[in-house]
Amino acid sequence: MSNLSVKEPLEEKQKLSSSSAITRVEDRFVYQDDELIDKAFNWSQFARLFGYIKPYAKQLLPFIILMMVLGTITKLAVPYITGAAIDKAIQPVSGAPSLKLLYGLTALALGLYLIQWAANAYRIKYTNIIGQRVIYDLRSDLFSHIQRLSFSFFDKRPAGSVLVRVTNDVNSLQDLFTNGAVNVMIDCVQLLGIVVILMLINWKLGLAVMLTVPLMFFVSTKLRKIIRLSWQEVRMKNSRINSHLNESIQGIRVTQAYTQEKENMKYFDNMNASSKKSWDKASALNQSFGPLIEITGGLGSMILFWYGATLIASGEIMIGTLVAFASYVGNFWDPINRLGNMYNQLLVAMASSERIFEFMDEKPSVADKPGAQPIPRINGDIVFDKVTFEYVANRPALREIDLHVTAGQSIALVGHTGSGKSTIINLISRFYDIKNGTIKIDGYDIRDVTLESLRGQISIVLQDTFIFSGTIRDNIRFGRLDATDEEVENAAKAVHAHVYIEKLPKGYDTEVEERGNVLSMGQRQLLSFARALLADPRILILDEATASIDTETELRIQEALKVLLQGRTSFIVAHRLSTIRHADHIVVLDHGQIKEEGTHAELIQKQGIYNGLIEAQFRFL
């Protein structure tokens, strides 16, 4: 069965919109999940994020670490060789300069550079492999989890807010996994190696150069919280832009019909400017590490050459030693600079991971209970026993509903907007869980059976049916993926969709755009009927399914429905008299309660709510 969204009553959407789930900002709705998260750096979350590397650790990490160590050692050896070449080959303390020794040391340095290049090339290659696999796994896990979340989750979030988690937030972690993690290890090893070498060469000069390091770390730590929050703000505003873009694209017809393009562009420009401002702020803070390191490095160089010159004058060190020291100090500030930038990158990644894991930690409000068993093939006997349900706490959408539908019976649900019609069909498929009472199908409480086995035997046809990008054939086959081409075409013929499909440029292989915009409303509706028929459900739900079909097509559909409804329990939500008058039983709802029940003739005779609805319909014909 297609897990297509079932519309909620307008009244319940209004209740939901007024709940604490959202707040109005700048005359627009901004969802709480997009608010700024002011938390300390979460090391457990950091470990959880890097847990995605674990499956590949034994396979690739040892080789990457070997290449990392080899590249670092060769890089650290070159300055020492340079110093030795000056002190022992170019300007030795005693004896003449030695070109032979100089050539030998030069060849050695070139050999080390080649080894360093090869090691780095292989390291980058395999770290990229790991990084892309990790991103693939993370995105797959996130999408799979979102697919399992309940309707209540999506009721409180715009589509753009969900979309930005799977795309932008996951993509922002890419650099962290492909380069960042390994570069941190390289820089840490390089820093440790440089400190050890400096102390071994001359511990006095080494300590003098290190004086500026505590100053740099003290200043940089003061910026950490500000930087982290600034990147979170960037993510938050990008999420709002995505939400607005999704809304604007979906509602472009309404926007143009009411000539609100300028207002919409003005609002988007404000959001865009706000996002740019946040990015500029975060980027400026991010770049503040560079000048900070340069200033600190400059102070370190001043100390190096002042104190180094003093040591040369006293004969404690030679010029080659000072040159080697200068090279090591230069190599010392570079990894510190990269670590500072890496920390900023890590803060960006943590801001995104907080948003990703917020969704990953979301539990479905409707899920299989422990020990749930598949429900056998359904006959379709359905009992509502004192069912009470709320979309929003303390605001019942249904109040103690008692209803018995026998297998194979067709039930029409009628009533004013917000009376609870769509809520009842939502509960049959268990898109939401009830507050009180029980719903049983063939004697099984639907909360005791698996969702897959329940929904797999129910099909829903909506007024605004969803058409996926792909071919006509694929859209019909969505009802049952293992159906043959012949079965697909037979289903289309049964609901009179075959005639118009054959007239399309490529027939059943015609590609349709997102939401089927190349098809008319009636044609999309016929596809949804074919899809439902192909699924061969035991329970069929028609939610205003014929509202968008013209009278001529409806006559054909009525004939198709006789075949479609035969032997199935069916629920029909409709306002058209022609659709509901032949139902076996009609249930009249008002403010979440059943007010009247009976056949069309019986309810007309009662002269009650149903009769008033019918008379109102005739007055507008």
Image: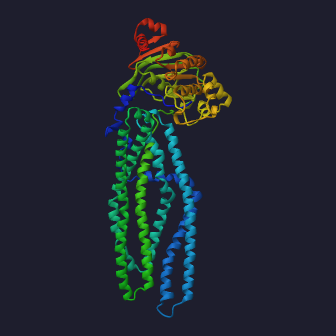
Pick whichever, 124 or 381, lies toward us: 124
Pick whichever, 69 or 337, lies toward us: 337
Residue drawn at 51 percent across, 14 percent down? 578
Residue drawn at 57 percent across, 73 percent down? 114
Q: Based on the displayed image, in which of its 4 quarters is residue 433 positioned?
A: top left
Does any portion of residue 361 appear in the rendered image? no
Q: Residue furthest bottom?
A: 95
Q: Position of residue 149 (x, y in %)?
A: 48, 37
Total marks in image: 0
The image shows residue 194, relative to residue 314, as above or below, that is above
Residue drawn at 52 percent across, 44 percent down? 141
Q: Based on the displayed image, in which of its 4 quarters is residue 212 positioned?
A: bottom left
Q: Position of residue 367 (x, y in %)?
A: 49, 33
The image shows residue 196, relative to residue 518, as above or below, that is below
Pick whichever, 593 or 500, lies toward us: 500
Q: Position of residue 88 (x, y in %)?
A: 50, 87
Q: Residue furthest top?
A: 605
473 relative to 309 in the view: left or right: right
Does any portion of residue 258 appear in the rendered image? yes
Quarter the C terminus occupies? top left
Q: Position of residue 383 (x, y in %)?
A: 50, 19
The image shows residue 347, relative to residue 523, as above or below, that is below
Quarter the N terminus occupies? top right
The image shows residue 164, relative to residue 250, as above or below, that is below
